[in-house]
Image (cartoon, helix red, strand yellow):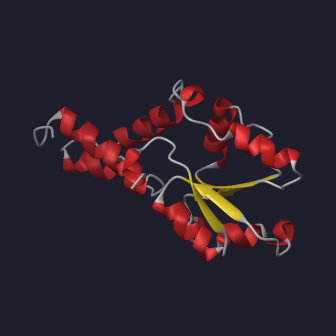
Amino acid sequence: MAEAGSPAALHEALCARRESDRHRSGLFEELLQQYGLPTTWGAECAARFHEHPGTELPSVPSLRCELDELRSKGYKIALVTNGGESLQKRKLRLLGFEGMFDICIYCDPSRREHLKPSVWGWDQLLSWRAGLPAGYVGDDPVDARFAEVGRARFIRFAFRNNRYEN
């Protein structure tokens, strides 16, 4: 653990916030203020976060083979994600998943009622799903709750953070 008030402690706090509450507005401003730094830096922090080149994404564990197999068997595949559309589309491109899904639902991070685990994402899929059984693949507890809300089987996938593997 870094010394309180140090740049390393701020970095740790920002990383922790990103994991715990990354879709809440003011992600950076609140912590910058706690560290006595100008909250006006928040916009630049957010811009740098969104411009991150994501070079690590192509090398992370992938569900590509499993998704390809499901598609070859005629299954329909949807994506429901908490995150802005432009950022999530960029991630899909970097992961090589562009065009993989039949439908993509981007939960607007500025609208709390849209974010998983709310039923909003499932509501957007209602006619597409047409009452068919569903499975939901996710990597964190919010995804597990979202699957439960939609009465879907939850399939855990440890994407990058071992804290969810227990």
In the picture provided, is 123 more to the left or to the right than 156? right
In the picture provided, is 9 more to the left or to the right than 73? left
Q: Is residue 123 visible?
A: yes
Residue 50 rendering spot, x and y as whole percentages? 52, 36
Q: Is residue 104 visible?
A: no
* Residue 110 location, quadrant: bottom right
- Residue at 80%, 49% in the rendered image: 70
- Residue at 59%, 73% in the rendered image: 148
Q: Foreground residue, 7 or 78? A: 78
In the picture provided, is 61 more to the left or to the right than 163? right
User: In the current view of this chain or complex, which residue is farthest to the left?
Assistant: 3
- Residue at 61%, 49% in the rendered image: 84
Q: Quadrant of the N terminus?
A: top left
Q: Foreground residue, 84 or 155? A: 155
Q: How many marks?
A: 0
Q: Foreground residue, 43 or 108? A: 108
- Residue at 46%, 40% in the rendered image: 160
Q: Foreground residue, 130 or 82? A: 130
* Residue 138 location, quadrant: bottom right
Q: Quadrant of the C terminus?
A: bottom left
Residue 71 rendering spot, x and y as whole percentages? 84, 47
